[in-house]
Image (spheres, rainbow, N blue to C red):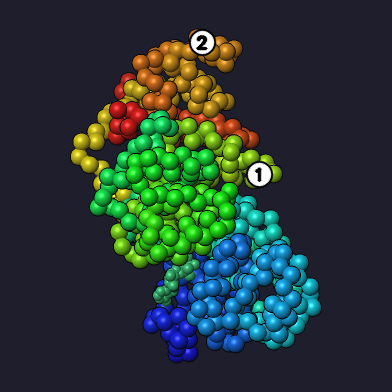
Amino acid sequence: MAAMERVLKEFFGYSSFRPFQKEVVAQILKGKDCLVIMATGSGKSICYQLPPLITKKTAIIISPLISLMQDQVMGLQQRGIRAEYMGSSQTDRTVNARAENGEYDVLYMTPERACSISQSFWTALLRRGVSLLAVDEAHCVSEWGHDFRHEYQKLDCLRPFLPKVPFVALTATATDKVRADIVKSLKLQNAFTAISSFDRPNIFYGVKGLSRTTAFKEELAREILTDVEKRGSTIIYCTTIKDVEEVVEALQKAGADARPYHAKMTNKLRTETHRAFSTDELQIVVATVAFGMGIDKPDIRRVIHYGCPKSLEAYYQESGRCGRDGLPSQCWLYYTRGDFAKADFYTAGSTTAARKEAVMQAYMAAQKYCGTVECRRSTLLKYFGEISATENCGNCDNCVRPEGVQYRNFSEEAHLLMTAIKACGGRFGLGVPIDVLRGSMAKKVVSYGFEKSPVHGLGRGKSANWWKSLADQLLVLGYLKEVVRDTFRLISVADKGDQYLWSATNMGVASALMLPLSQEMA
Ligand code: ADP
Ligand code: ZN
């Protein structure tokens, strides 16, 4: 096995393997299928780039984006590795011919290309030898994944053309469901599974909820610019191009050198921004999520999300682009309550009801992350099925709450809210019970007779957002639950809430419910 270390050093200049790399390479050399689930930045690529250099047989890599492939191919070529990519519309015959002839160590292609290529190509290539077929970003096969792609589901069609070639699926994000889908869809046989920890201890996680969109941008600009000690390469992710433009404007107005990056810009401009950012000429890029797929900059110090991301998988991946060098880095998420009404925006592209529901569930998990009062890190890790060693990581906003953040007993308000939700019978979203509490005579309230409820109007003294913020906390703590019907989210009282109400009524005492005062509740 000394050959493995030698090749690693010779081509990549690394003197040792990172966790799991060596094990995965060894299994591939034995011809075994592998499922590699490792965090972004942990070095998955080595797992499929090394075997062809040892066996002198081509490695086929399926990758979703041309830009991603271009970056990787360039990096490999600079290391003296014979790498090339075949795009979906590429008509380059020389690449085809050379590929068939086994002249590449690493050959990238899109899933469309892989599925449409002729059988004779595979036969020819197989004669020269194929070391592995890797499916990068393998979560794309799953409807439950955050980035479902139809063509990924057809990849099992390659199995018959490549008998005995190990299939290697790699992803940075996989919940149990996605993991099972990958194995099933790619027909992985008895796969060797490597799962590394998702924890990124050097990253600080924080969330800020702000109530107004305009103040939002100004506050963002102010914080970014006054935060001198934390300065460093920063990516600000926005959900829409419009947001990108507005945030850039706010930052530039405040005197910052910030540039946009999004799909509507010319290729030339985008490349230039990418270059300036990579060489530290430019510190702040404001971008849609399109920016970053191919970014391999180890010293990004901050990733800021302007608006709630569509899922925790996406959040983990995007925020994970900072601090790859292991030095302290910050991930902040800024949201407004208005974001949560945007679920339609995310479900719009879904074709089936099941897909729609999956998208909604994923979005609700992200929303819960915003509202949680528990450790952000353990919330993220739990979502990925990992139990963290401690409930207090000491490196997120909830674990290092500055003194002065008050906890208060909200048992009375919680009691009111849960009673109102019960009165509405679990058939509505949060808006109706809050209307009831606030004494509204809206059509929906009156037509169901909710104005006769004993709690009608008892919560008049507090704003709708105040009640929503309380509901967030009760959701996180399991007193309330939310289910998705179509794209509607129905709120109801969970067992834990029922017990709470029961003991308050039957024992005559509501036990204290200590919650921190969120910004919206202060
Ligand atoms: P992933 O695909 O898991 O996000 P990459 O394969 O892009 O991660 O690797 C992330 C970074 O780690 C790259 O900069 C790469 O050069 C570096 N790297 C990978 N393996 C090693 C190693 N064994 N020793 C040192 N650095 C490594
Ligand atoms: Zn924490």
The alpha-carbon separation of the residues under discs 1 and 2 comes to: 36 Å
Can residue 343 be seen here? yes
**What residue sits right under mark 1 in the picture?**
350
- The residue at 76%/81% (across/down) is 123
Quarter of image, ligand 1: bottom left
Query: Residue at the left extreme?
Result: 403
- Helix, strand or loop for disc 2: loop
Q: Residues within 10 Å of mark 2 (few under 14, many from 20)?
A: some
In the rendered image, the vertical position of residue 85 relative to residue 223, given as above or below? below
Q: Position of residue 268 (x, y in %)?
A: 55, 58
Determine whether 495 is above or below 202 in the image: above
On the image, the x and y values in percent for residue 404 come to 20, 36
306 left or right of 201 in image: right
Could you say where residue 210 lies in the image, as x and y percent from the top left? 38, 34
Inspect the image, locate mark 1, and give the three-letter code of the amino acid beneath it. Answer: Ser
Report the front residue among 312 and 196. 312
Residue type at numbered disc 2:
Met
Q: Which mark identifies residue 441?
A: 2
Where's the C terminus, which quadrant? Answer: top left
Residue 31 appears in the rendering: no
Could you tell me residue 15's position as x and y percent? 38, 82
Question: Which mark identifies residue 103?
Answer: none
Instruction: Identify the residue shown where x is 54% and y is 73%.
Output: 74
| Foreground label between 1 and 2 | 1
Residue beneath the point at 53% across and 77% down: 76
**Compared with residue 394, is residue 186 higher up or lower down, i.e. above or below?**
below
